[in-house]
Amino acid sequence: MALPFTYHAKAQSTFKPPLIANENAFLGDVQSSENENPDKPMSCGFYRLEKGTPLVYTYTYDEMKIIVEGKFEIADETGQKVTATPGDVFYFPKGATITFTTDDYGLAFYVGIPYPGPEILFKGETNEIQTGQRKQGAA
């Protein structure tokens, strides 16, 4: 049986992810295979951070990102810190706590297999923590 592919024309410029944390962190899945593969679905989408509160995120699944626009400062708890620019690729393993900041804005495309979705944690400068089931992605 032949299966069709799914196409999202110009998604990088037309998809606007919703606000997920603080006043400046936006993220949303463009595509998920949750309906087709409920046992091991994967999702992909865009993460945008604008100047303002850093986003501190603890991954509860493995994820990969490629920076597509702007610039991020990305740091982990080991002290590793990178200035990320378009074309840079990252792997964030389950359990890693990552801090994302930017002087202007950054846009990244992510792919992950986060389901079934354990609680996610976002922590900003105010130390407010938001938790919930991941349905629209994470950082």
Image (cartoon, rainbow, N blue to C red):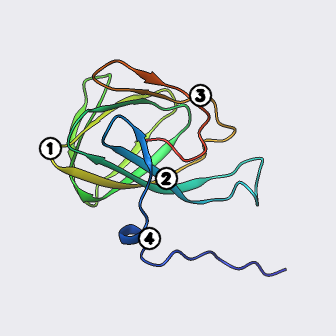
Residue 135's spot in the image, x, y percent? Answer: 61, 44
Left of 108 or right of it: where is 138? right
Q: Report, in whole angstroms, how far the alpha carbon at label 4 lies from the one at label 1.
A: 24 Å
Q: Report, in whole angstroms, how far the alpha carbon at label 2 lies from the one at label 3.
A: 16 Å
- Disc number placed over residue 11 in the picture, else none: 4
Q: Report, in whole angstroms, how far the alpha carbon at label 3 lies from the one at label 1.
A: 29 Å
Q: Quadrant of the N terminus?
A: bottom right
The residue that label 3 is drawn on is: 119
How busy is the neighbourhood of tag 1: few (under 14 within 10 Å), some, or many (20 plus)?
few
Give the residue at x 53% y 46%. 137
Left of 64 or right of it: where is 117? right
Look at label 1 and name its amino acid.
Answer: Asp
How busy is the neighbourhood of tag 4: few (under 14 within 10 Å), some, or many (20 plus)?
few
The residue that label 2 is drawn on is: 28
**SS at badge 1:** loop
Q: Report, in whole angstroms, how far the alpha carbon at label 2 lies from the one at label 4.
A: 12 Å
Residue 66's spot in the image, x, y percent? Answer: 36, 55
Residue 43's spot in the image, x, y percent? Answer: 58, 54
Sequence-earlier tag: 2 or 3: 2
- Disc number placed over residue 103 in the picture, else none: 1
Q: Report, in whole angstroms, how far the alpha carbon at label 3 lies from the one at label 4.
A: 27 Å
Give the residue at x 56% y 77%. 7
Q: 24 or 3, which lies in front?
A: 24
Most extreme residue toward the front is 23
Q: What is the quadrant of residue 52 in the picture?
A: top left
